[in-house]
Image (cartoon, rainbow, N blue to C red):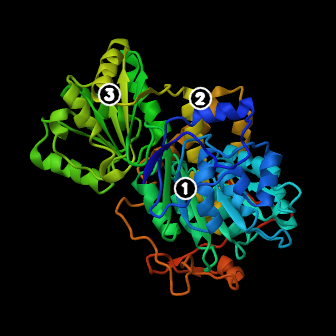
Amino acid sequence: MSEDISDTTMPGADVSAPEPAENAAFSVTEGLSVSEPENALPKVGLADLPEAMRAACARAGWQSLMPVQSLALPYLLEGRDIMVQSRTGSGKTGCYLLPMLPRLDPELKAPQALVLAPTRELAVQVEREAAVIFADTGIRTVAVYGGVGYKKQMDALREGAQVIVGTPGRVLDHLLRRTLDLRDLRVLVFDEADRMLSIGFYPDMKEVQRYLPRKRIHTCLFSATYPPHVLKLAAEFMSEPALLSLSQKEVHVAEVQHLFCEVKPMDKDRALVRLLETENPASAIIFCNTKANVHYVTGVLQGFGYSADELSADLSQNRREAVLDKIRKGRLQYLVATDVAARGIDIPALSHVFLYEPPEDHESYIHRAGRTGRAGAAGTVISLVDVMQRMELERIAKHYKIGLMELPLPTDEDVAKVAGTRLTAILEARFRTLTGLERVRVARYAALARELAQQSEEEDDVQLLAMLLDACHQRSLHENRFPDSEPVPARRKNDAGDAPRSRGDAAGRDDAAGRDEAEPHDGNRRRRRRSPRRRKDGGDSGAGTES
């Protein structure tokens, strides 16, 4: 069910004399497109909320509910698993924090809600907002993330906190150390799930799932887009979830997002690499107008270490089929092709289309854009254009009534930050798999690494470390960072109404956390390495820096 809304509150809510700030909020919501689940629940206003939640809104300075809060709160208060699609800054954090108030027990000094976030910045932001909402309620929030030591976080967990906000890698670290126990968990939130998957947190998220209690947990998932790998994640963690989508025309679960970057012709190859780093698509086609450019762009991408190959009329039929088979099976991330080569091919789960150069006619743009956003999934089309090409692209958008938006070109600093976050998560994940002897080997080089890092005035020394990090990053480019694109059936509730979640239960969590053998999801048995040995001060002999 879809509708356009510009009002966010129920009739009767006390918003007859809105303040200027509230008026500004209303203007932002104009033209919102809303897609609600079947048997949709009526939206709520501030006056419809329980007293404790209204008091929390007052502490936060909210004079009315944002659209996503007004529409999603009924499902969250009812305890239904829900997937919410809404843009950044739309009020999603308050949307999932508010309903925790009636569900959490401040007398129980144990984690009852877990919020997984992709970055330390977001984890800290959520913790700060939670501190305001939960003020004077007895509910404490602790943020756990990489880049800092463990001791302060361990002390905070030991003192007792009802809400844990953290990156998947650092949460898993605390589970392995037994400094975090989820046996009393009631609420699980995935915030910005698409970004968590793009960073490469899927294995960590699946491992965290092993520590969830068997009882049904109220789970909600928030994401700006819902490509196939995000939908698969929802099916693996949620029980019969509802889907609520709020969007402006350019961003929608069932629509294609049309963007462009204005770049100089000589800078297009570098611009493309920056976009691939920051967008980090699950799979993509890069369109060029000539076979020569297809070959050139493929060489550039392969030179940067990407899993890329070309498709042009020069290739034999057997070679073309082999390339297409690789990308369909997820063994190839980027395909560079001309219109002729790509015509008629169907690649499921294609998240992005890049136009290295604009098409030579209007129909070709529609053909290229149609490679993504299949079967109701989200898709993104990004065109690289110069000043004159931008004018032509805008004419195409006007002709087909396409909502075209300019995308600022990522800077080198933007790329470094994104790549650093992703690489740190990869390193910490690998560190967790090391055996005791392997950790001893690694520890031999800790002093050298510290010395090289501290001698920042010697650029050559810093470059030595950068070279090693790049080698690790290159290796990760050819690893599958996304769940399989094949659809999986959503979990069904059992006869008791509870959804199965993990193999360990609340009563046996201590045993499960330290056992040597564990049963993986595929039913085969594998060795599980022991958690790292802790020092008396709560630290670790060589832990990574960020999750």
Q: Position of residue 402 (x, y in %)?
A: 34, 31
x, y percentage for residue 385? 36, 20
Task: Name the residue rendered at 32%, 27% in the picture.
Answer: 356
Identify the residue under disc 3.
Answer: 356
Residue at 43% over, 36% down: 250
Q: Residue 509: tell me if it is visible.
A: yes
Image position of 147 with respect to 534: above or below: above
Give the mark nearer the N terminus: 3 vs 1: 1
Q: What amino acid does circle 2 point to?
A: Glu
Residue 43 vs residue 108, the one in the foreground: 43
The residue at which mark 1 appears reads as: 201
* Mark 1 residue type: Phe
Residue 413: give its label.
2
Q: Which of 27 and 299 is in front in this view?
A: 27
Graded by Cα atoms within 10 Å as few (under 14), some (14 to 19) or many (20 or more), the crowding at tag 2 reads few
Query: Could you tell me which secondary element the residue under label 2 belongs to?
Result: helix
What crowding class fits label 3: few (fewer than 14 Cα within 10 Å), some (14-19), or many (20 or more)?
A: many
- Tell me where residue 4 appears, x and y as whole percent: 47, 42
